[in-house]
Image (cartoon, rainbow, N blue to C red):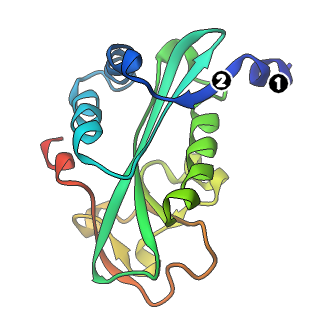
Amino acid sequence: MRGDKVNRLLIRDETESDYRVVRAIHEAAFGQSGEASLVESLRVAASPRVSLVAELEGERVGHIFLSPVRVEGQPPRGACAGLAPVGVKPSAQGRGVGSALVREALGRCPALGWSAVFLLGDPDYYARFGFVLAAPLGFRYESELFDSHFQVLELEAGALAGGQGWVRYHEAFSAL
């Protein structure tokens, strides 16, 4: 049965014709408009970026966005990205859509020169992709209060070696 789910799922680049639906996906997934507005701001200002849409049985049901981040302090060797937001319509949750979006997005990062990806999220969920807590490696987000959920994935072995500091997302995140 799992194979059937995968065969009916398509992950593709977001196009302009998706914008209105992507907004609705994030509003439904988060119960507010903040993340939807963030995506709209990042589309205009963040580069490079990964912006993908998930279609399940022909219906657009998910979206993910990755944008560059910088490290204040001792930057790691390579460029880094921040994964946020990722949203799946409530009616499609639990069907592998979010996982497929994350895997595809991570697979596209090396082509953009990103050697590591940071995110703020549920460690139990993101561990399946190889994410680990960032604070023990010397990376923090905003405040120590986020240490239990701020994570990183090294896409290139040793990419984070010698780095440490505060991870700063695009200024559009300040509106959240």
Which circle's residue, 2 or 1, is located before the other in the chain?
1
Q: Is residue 6 above or below residue 68?
A: above
Residue 79, given in percent of the width and then of the height, sits at 42, 70
Q: As shown in the figure, which amino acid type bears the numbered disc 2? A: Leu
As drawn, the residue found furthest toward the left would be 175
Judged left or right of residue 45, residue 21 is right
Where does label 2 land, which residue?
10
Q: Is residue 162 above or below residue 44?
A: below
Q: Residue at x 53, y 12 (%)?
A: 91
Which of the 4 quarters of the picture holds residue 39? top left
Mark 1, Cα crowd under 10 Å, few <14 / some 14-19 / many 20+, is few
Q: Residue at x 49, y 80 (%)?
A: 160
Residue 45, given in percent of the width and then of the height, sits at 22, 45
Quarter that holds the N terminus? top right
Secondary structure of the residue carrying numbered label 2: strand
Q: CA distance from mark 2 to mark 1?
A: 14 Å
Where does label 1 land, which residue?
2
